[in-house]
Image: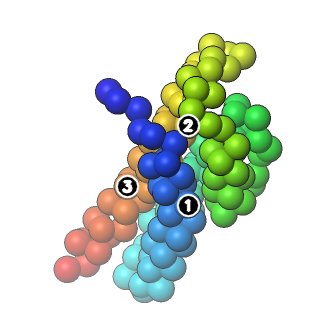
Amino acid sequence: MALRSPDDARVAVRSFPRRFSELLAAAEGDPDIPDDVVAAVAEAEAAATSALSDASVALGGVAAGVLGAAADELTAVIDRRHGEQWKEALPDGRMALEVLDRAVSEAADHLRAAERRVEAARDERD
């Protein structure tokens, strides 16, 4: 599997706060969406935050506890690395680009899972 480029990752990372915020607002604003589904969206957002924050730390940045800050920090880390630096091995042996790609994939997986939960709840009421 080909790794995404840092530019593609930057676009995805920047979109996560908006996409999670919109999904959570839609779920919270729909009286037919059960509380456990709303909670699942919030948990998915927390898991995505953790994935992005962990990648920031692994790549030389700092940890952040909320999605917007984690996305901003990882974007700053992406902007500080160039070209061949993405191919460098980190202390744990992983390649920098692999760490970035995995974090973006993980955050996207959490978002898609949350979207599916909300959609399933909507389908149940119809």
Cα–Cα gap, marks 2 and 1:
13 Å
Name the residue carrying label 2: 100
Circles 3, 1 touching at the beta carbon (< 8 Å): no
At which x and y percent is residue 102? 50, 35
Q: Position of residue 76 (x, y in %)?
A: 70, 51
- Residue 39 seen in render: no
Q: Quadrant of residue 96?
A: top right
Q: Which residue is mark 1?
A: 14
Relative to residue 119, is residue 33 depicted above or below? below
CA gap, disc 2 to disc 3? 18 Å
Mark 3: give few (<14), some (14-19) or many (20+) Cα within 10 Å: some
Closer to viewer: mark 3 or mark 1: 1
Q: Nearer the viewer, residue 20 or 16?
A: 16
At x 66% / y 63%, what residue is drawn? 68
The answer to whether the residues at label 2 and label 3 have Cβ atoms under 8 Å apart is no
Q: Of helix, strand and loop, which one carries label 3?
A: helix
Which amino acid type corresponds to the residue marked 3 in the rendered image?
Arg
Q: Earlier in the sequence, mark 3 or mark 1?
A: 1
On the question of residue 100 being in view, the answer is: yes
Which residue matches tag 3? Answer: 112
Q: Residue at x 51, y 79 (%)?
A: 25
**At which x and y percent is residue 1?**
32, 27
Q: x%, y% of residue 34?
A: 43, 73
| Quadrant of the image containing the C terminus | bottom left
Q: Amino acid at mark 2?
A: Leu
37 vs 85: above or below: below
Q: Nearer the viewer, residue 47 or 6?
A: 6
